[in-house]
Amino acid sequence: MPVSLLMMLLAAVLLVWSQAGLARGLPDFTELVEENADAVVNISTTSAPASGNTRFHGLPFDERQLDQLPEFFQEFFRGPQSPFGGAPGNSRPRRSMGSGFIVSADGYVLTNNHVVEGADEIIVRLNDRRELPATLVGTDPRSDMAVLKIEGGGDLPVVKTGRSRDLKVGEWVFAIGSPFGFDYTVTAGIVSALGRSLPSENYVPFIQTDVAINPGNSGGPLFNLDGEVVGINSQIYTRSGGFMGVSFSIPIDDAMSVFRQIRDKGTVARGWLGVLIQEVNRDLAETFGLKRPRGALIAEVMDGSPAEKGGLQSGDIVLEYDGDEIEMSSDLPPMVGRTPVGEKARLTVLRNGKEITLDVEIGQLPDEGGAQQAEPENGKSSTAPLGLTVEPLPEDAVESIGVAGGVVVTGVGRGPAYNAGIRARDVITEINREPVTSIEDFRKAVRALPEGKAVSVRVVRQGRAIYLVMKP
């Protein structure tokens, strides 16, 4: 046999071996799906027809889900020839579809709030094709969760719940749901990131995955390779209307806490500190004496809040919460939210360059929200050397904006203040960690500014406090 032919055969054998080894290294989901599919349900809802000239009636999922679809699919479901009755003026009931899963043998089901929102009738379809009516036990729009109770289902199959806090980035996960109405569809992927904070909700540390999630998957379970539910599939990020490799799930630890509160009390209570926080960037870290950016900077403490009663102050940087490190400011709200109301939490904060410990009794988050995320403007801070003119803060303004004092910015020219982001009508209450309650305080603070070193400036803008970084 020629040497060249022998080498080709050897290469082919090695390729087959390598592919076989790669296949053996991938997870096999068949048994996991067989063990868990029975406890995953399809949820369909019926609502009264929408008023006006809306065309979105009789659809297999709600309008918000439909808007995520590519234009071709939207036309199919909404068009005049749609089998779902999409013609203008149609008075047929509105229908939507989603997924869910059974968490107790007596019929409690978890799903997303947006799946059942506004529903007049809820039907749960099981894997054995039984269709059972369900009642809405309660919802928590803040986390986009809903709890249902199946009526007359008898002894029902139940999922096994795991611990989302044990998840690691890169591990395999899979979802079972009803995308586009296709029942019991299985998709798989890996955990892409943990603790994601989305603009819509700061109290849910979402699990990010690349598992294919589409309209109809909402409310379905996310499983790990032990066959345990670790999340509830809730949202996708898309620019095209279709799946783009970024999906978000509610951690099961948070979901089960919400479930137990709804089941036992009918409402959900979250912990509350009563602070306005912002991210610590590199410049702020330098001005506050941190070696690297970390923690949550308290820009404002609300009057009468648990934070005020516990001794927290604006300018404190929360580094740890009950022993857990705070790397990003978005880490703090979920930790506070999970803390039972009335319990004390131990906070490690950086104040004036020194770490101190405070025990704060956690209050209950008001309905309209309490702990908020400040959104400072990107990097830009402050008479003459700073390019800034100020005036005393009028007495009537002291009470209206809730500050103890300060100076109001009346003009900003080119210079350090402008570069720091300070603008006219801002109220300066602190410079380089020194309080500013008067013009004299302001002048004294400016004279003491170190040359060439970044300093922090606290301003109140439109009623909200933020920290900016200024380099004189």
Image (cartoon, grey):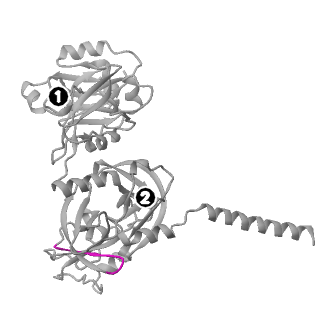
Residue 213 at x, y percent in the picture: 40, 65
Q: Quadrant of the C terminus?
A: top left
Q: Which residue is mark 2?
A: 246
Which quadrant of the structure image shows residue 128? bottom left
- What stretch of residues is rendered in magenta? 120-129
Q: Extreme front residue here?
A: 155
296 relative position to 10: left or right? left
**Viewer-side residue, 252 vs 235:** 252
Magenta-span inclusion, residue 47:
no
139 relative position to 13: left or right? left
Residue 217 at x, y percent in the picture: 36, 68
Q: Quadrant of the N terminus?
A: bottom right
**Viewer-side residue, 32 vs 270:** 32
Find the distance from the CA under tag 2 to the CA under tag 1: 41 Å
Classify 22 as above or below 193. Answer: below
Which quadrant of the structure image shows residue 458? top left
Magenta-span inclusion, residue 122:
yes
**Viewer-side residue, 202 vs 73:** 202
Which quadrant of the structure image shows residue 233? bottom left
Q: Residue sitting at 27 percent across and 26 percent down?
A: 358
Q: Secondary structure at mark 1?
A: helix
Q: For mark 1, does the 10 Å Cα neighbourhood hold few (<14), some (14 to 19), or many (20 or more) residues?
A: some
Callout 2 touching callout 1 (CB < 8 Å): no
Q: Residue sitting at 17 percent across and 36 percent down?
A: 463
Q: Which residue is mark 1?
A: 309
Q: Nearer the viewer, mark 2 or mark 1?
A: 1
Q: For mark 2, does the 10 Å Cα neighbourhood hold few (<14), some (14 to 19), or many (20 or more) residues?
A: some
Residue type pointed to by label 2: Val
Q: Secondary structure at mark 2?
A: loop
Q: Is residue 376 visible?
A: yes
Q: Residue sitting at 23 percent across and 19 percent down?
A: 435
